[in-house]
Amino acid sequence: MRPPIRGTSPRRDALRPERGGADPETDPETDSDNGGHAHAVTQTQATTTDQAAANEKLVLALPKGRILDELAPMLDHAGIEPEAAFSDDDSRQLRFTTNHPELDIIRVRSFDVATFVAFGAAHLGVAGNDVIMEFDYPELYAPVDLGIGHCRMAVAQPRELVKDDDPARWSHVRIATKYPNITKQHFAARGVQAETVKLNGAMELAPSLGLCRRIVDLVSSGKTLKANDLVEVEHIANVTSRLIANRAALKTRPHALGDWIERFREAADAA
């Protein structure tokens, strides 16, 4: 057996690519081809995802309750006609088709509308700015004040306390409310420490039953406060209903969502 030529090795020769072949680890042209293929695959996947999102039905989340009565003329002005079950008080159905094949409506609790939209389960919704402020989801965009659902958020306490009580001298308060975040922020801005007791309703009972001396709640006519011998002592915010949108959906489907936003804006202007 002849010895190998000096300066070469059988092992290195075996690892060399054949003449005319490309070494995938060193050949720049091959690297470019592989990179281009990977980029093309990624681009194809992204396009497929975008197309799937574009073909997905839009979902509009609406709140249950009296606000629907005020919202009905706006839906009509925007050209939205829900299926008959939407107006049936005995129906347990929660998702409804409309006269637009690409648009469905879901009906949920007012406090849940913002969550459905923020997490992308719904693309659009109608929520009061009390709910928007309480949750403060960065994923929400509120482009249109619909000008309905007018009320105010206020601090109230028993009438008998008002004569000898000065809110400017408060340093610590205990408040019953379903808005703990707004309440704490409001009092923190004044340098007052607020302890909140979370309730979902019947706030007006809290002072008379010794749960706390004050409440933060929405006030419309003031009749409920008066009936429970409570009076407003501080104003926190004015409240109306807003059209809200999911920011990510607005970026991926700007034309579809933008069209509905403009329809609701026109409906609000016409009201």
Image (cartoon, rainbow, N blue to C red):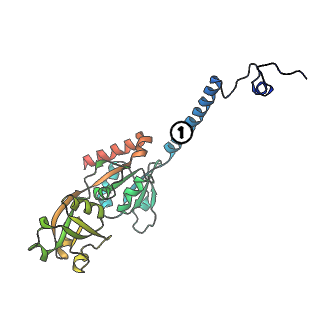
Write down the quadrant of residue 228 in the picture. bottom left
Image x and y of residue 130, in percent: 28, 58
Instruction: Return the residue nearer the eye: 133 or 242.
Output: 133
Q: Read off the residue under disc 1.
A: 46
In this rendering, the answer to whether 50 lies above or below 67 is: above
In this view of the protein, can residue 143 be seen by the observer? yes
Question: Which part of the image, by quadrant, shows the N terminus?
Answer: top right
Q: Residues within 10 Å of mark 1 (few under 14, many from 20)?
A: few
Write down the quadrant of residue 18 in the picture. top right
In this view of the protein, can residue 152 be seen by the observer? no
Q: Residue furthest left?
A: 163
Secondary element under disc 1, as helix, strand or loop, is helix
Instruction: Return the residue nearer the eye: 127 or 91.
Output: 127
- The residue shown at (89%, 21%) is 2
Is 4 displayed left or right of 164 in the figure? right
Write down the quadrant of residue 202 in the picture. bottom left
Number of callouts in the render?
A: 1
Instruction: Return the residue nearer the eye: 253 or 102.
Output: 253
Image x and y of residue 225, in percent: 19, 72
- The residue shown at (44%, 57%) is 83
Image x and y of residue 112, in percent: 38, 61
| Residue type marked 1 | Ala
Image x and y of residue 125, in percent: 37, 53
Q: Residue furthest right?
A: 1
In this rendering, the answer to whether 207 lies above or below 49 is: below
